[in-house]
Image: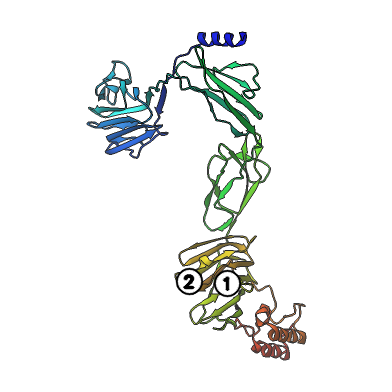
Amino acid sequence: MKKVLSLLFVALLALSAWADTTVTFIPGETVGSNTTATAADEMSLDGVKFSCTTAAFAAAQYRFGGGSTTTITSTVGKIKKIEFTCTASYGQSYGPNQLYGDGYSSQSGSNVGTWQGEAETIVLKAASQCRVSKIVVTIAEDVVTELVAPVFTPNGGEFSGSLEVTLSCATQNAQIYYWEGTEEEQSEWVYYNGPFYVTDTKTYTAVSMKGSDMSDYVTVTFTKVEQTVDAPVFSPASCSFSDPFEVTLSCATPNAKIFYSLDNEMWSEYTGAIPVTDDLTIWAKAVVGDIESEVVSATYTKLPETTVEVTFDAAVDPGNGSTTRHSYTVVKDLVTMYVGDGTVYSDHYRIYGPNDSSAFVFTSAGAPIIKIELSSGTASQTPSNLSLLDNENGTYTTSGKEGTWVGNAQEVAFKVNAQVRLYTVIVTLAGQEEPTYQVGDVNHDGHVTIADVTALIDYLLSDSSAAPAEGDVNGDSNVTIADVTALIDLLLGGNAE
């Protein structure tokens, strides 16, 4: 009983003034649309809105145009005061005396103009242009006479690190007390006079008091969880390039700092775009406090100045495909295009799927493939029905009837998600290179002998699409029985090695 009376006595002695709310407008932080005062503009912050007939609220200073009318409204309570801090003093160009209206005043020698009163809507005019570096709007809080329970901010929940907690009560001149524990687990009461911090899982209870009255109890629990930090994201991701460009980094975790390294040893804080002019690998990680994300990396490969384009044309490069559905292979200039399930027509290649046989693969026996451009003539069977197989390197993007893979690989495999019709296929190689195989060496033993004839016949009898590029002895980009004859002629002519 003595404890309660003592607390009531403290509450009566510790009455505090009820604070109003301020809303501060700063150029560059809260902005409108115009950078010159030639048209209407507006800006809003925390329920307060400025609308001006001629203004520049996106300029380095807020500019209220000469002859303009500004309407200030509040949806969060009545406005008691507005202070305009100008870039010039009273009597000078752009000074506070350029504004006028009921309740507004400015004093000689000062750069501040003030409106005072109590209204939800205020109208001010500008005789000449006025430039302002800060606007502070004071909102009168609604007065609550009945005693209500206090409010925790935040109102419980999970947190990581250290959490700032505040308490408030809508009742004017009410006092707030809190303690660690539930209503039934009351410990020493603490008079609330400012924020406190929570670093571990805790339960708190609070109560409001005014005179001899006491509000309901409010109990909240703050649960500490281990913080995780998202890894940074590269834009663009790993890719090959021709012209210099810049890489940017971002992180989805709020307030995370990003660090990057060019050798995975020395780290620098990321403050802006990273230029890429040559082959480069960038490592990056994000940090919040003492918590770090995983380290991720992106590799950028500069393409050679000399490239070679290999164009597949269904009319002249059908390979062993036909209008009957089956797997087929088209070989041209050291590049092989393999279709697991498809057909070839006079003007386009068709790739079917998805099914157990569907596949779409490019391989190069010479220089690496650095780009594949796919183009469709239809509106639905487009390259967007393709995607890269899991773990396939490079990037694949589509737009409309076009699809483009960019990277650096000897083989590129696509997943067929729906039928695709390709009217143009262009494969770009990183410069011309000599074949890495010997024509006619079908069994890959390093020599061209009668054993290769047997191996080639075996391929043709089983599945000609599986025959290696070495089997294209006559150079017509197809492996057929004609190549068996050409291989025998090669051996009989004594030109084989």
Instruction: Count the marks.
Output: 2
Which comes before the other along the chain, label 1 or label 2?
1
Tell me, yes or no, if residue 59 can be seen here. no
- The residue to which callout 2 is attached is 376
Residue at 53% x, 72% y is 419
Within 10 angstroms of label 2, few (less than 14), some, or many (20 or more) residues? many
- The amino acid at mark 2 is Ser
Determine whether, in the image, residue 244 is placed left or right of residue 127. right
Residue at 59% x, 67% y is 414
Tell me, yes or no, if residue 347 can be seen here. yes
- The amino acid at mark 1 is Gly
Can you tell which quarter of the image residue 110 is in?
A: top left
- 244 vs 207, nearest the viewer: 207
Residue at 71% x, 90% y is 488
Can you tell which quarter of the image residue 126 is in?
A: top left
- 289 vs 296, nearest the viewer: 289
Vertical relation: 155 (above or below) 464: above
Q: Secondary structure at mark 1?
A: loop
Vertical relation: 132 (above or below) 105: below
- 154 vs 88, nearest the viewer: 154
Residue 406's tag is none
Q: Secondary structure at mark 2?
A: loop
- The residue to which callout 1 is attached is 353
Within 10 angstroms of label 1, few (less than 14), some, or many (20 or more) residues? many
